[in-house]
Image (cartoon, helix red, strand yellow):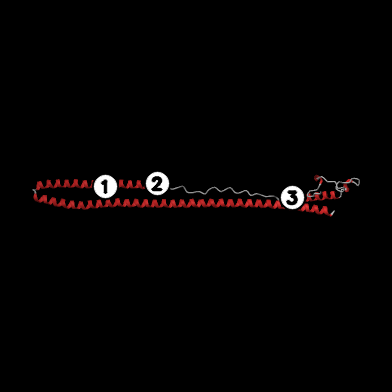
Amino acid sequence: MVLPVLFGLATAGFGAMSAVGKHQQGRAQADAANQAARNQYRDALSMRQYRYNQQLGAYNQRLADYSAGLAESELGLKRGFTAIDKRASERYGQAAFQAQNNLISDIQAGGQLAASLPAGISDRAITMARGAAGRRDALVQDNLLRARFGDIQAARDMTMQANMYRRKLFSALPMAPTMAPMPTAPVMQQGPSALSLIGGLGSAALSGITAGMSMNSMMNPGAGAGAGAAPGLSQGVDVPVSQMPAGMAFP
């Protein structure tokens, strides 16, 4: 009776250890897969942030170049306007000095005419000289006005060129980078449940009970067959393998 019990307990123990081992192996595999998925997800997030920072750095550099180009264009435009105003001031200054010289010359010429010619003739000569001086002064003012219109057109051309340069800078400016979509969150594996372990332990226990009962039946054949039936084991007759308990083999 002891041997069948021990055999059943051993069979149940081996089955229980196998069930526990399979359960632990399944849990370890699920944990390893989950950890790998978490690592992959973390790496994807890190790469997403790295690429965004890289693109943002390049964009900020291009934006700084664009701002520097605008400042340079504005400074060049102001220098051009200053040069135009300076030339205009010099022209007006020269015209004013020339007008003063012309006035002095006209007065001197009129005095000379009045002193050298008779009264009627001198008045006519002075009038003609004054008309010529007026035409001269009108021509000077016309030249100044034309030069001023030229300055205005030059300022417009400079402004147009500056705007074209600014538009070119802006067209070369890339779009601001945006963060890439979030990677798909990993789906964690559940692994074997406690119910499967309980089921495996139950199956091991049942296998142990079955093995013990089978061995008990083989060792005590008369318990179920009666005294007149001599089983093959007791008579030395070979027992079919299909009728032997698991893990047992008799010659």
At which x and y percent is residue 71? 38, 52
Residue at x-position 47% and y-position 52%: 57
Please tell me whether mark 2 sits on a helix, a strand or a loop. Answer: helix
- Mark with earlier residue (2, 3): 2
Residue type indicated by callout 2: Lys
In this view, the residue in front, 158 or 181, is 181
Residue type indicated by callout 1: Ala
Tally of marks: 3
At which x and y percent is residue 109? 13, 50
Q: Is residue 230 left or right of residue 72?
A: right
Question: What's the CA distance linking mark 2 and mark 3?
Answer: 76 Å
- Mark with earlier residue (1, 3): 1
Do callouts 1 and 3 mark residues in contact (Cβ within 8 Å)? no
At which x and y percent is residue 85? 29, 51
What residue did someone put label 2 on?
168
Q: How many C-alpha atoms fall within 10 Å of the one at disc 3: few (<14), some, or many (≥20)?
A: many
Q: Is residue 215 left or right of residue 74?
A: right
Disc number placed over residue 200 in the picture, else none: 3
Q: Is residue 114 left or right of residue 219?
A: left
Q: How many C-alpha atoms fall within 10 Å of the one at disc 2: few (<14), some, or many (≥20)?
A: few
Residue at x-position 72% and y-position 49%: 196
Question: What's the CA distance linking mark 1 and mark 2?
Answer: 31 Å
What residue did someone put label 1 on?
147
- Mark with earlier residue (1, 2): 1
Do callouts 1 and 2 mark residues in contact (Cβ within 8 Å)? no
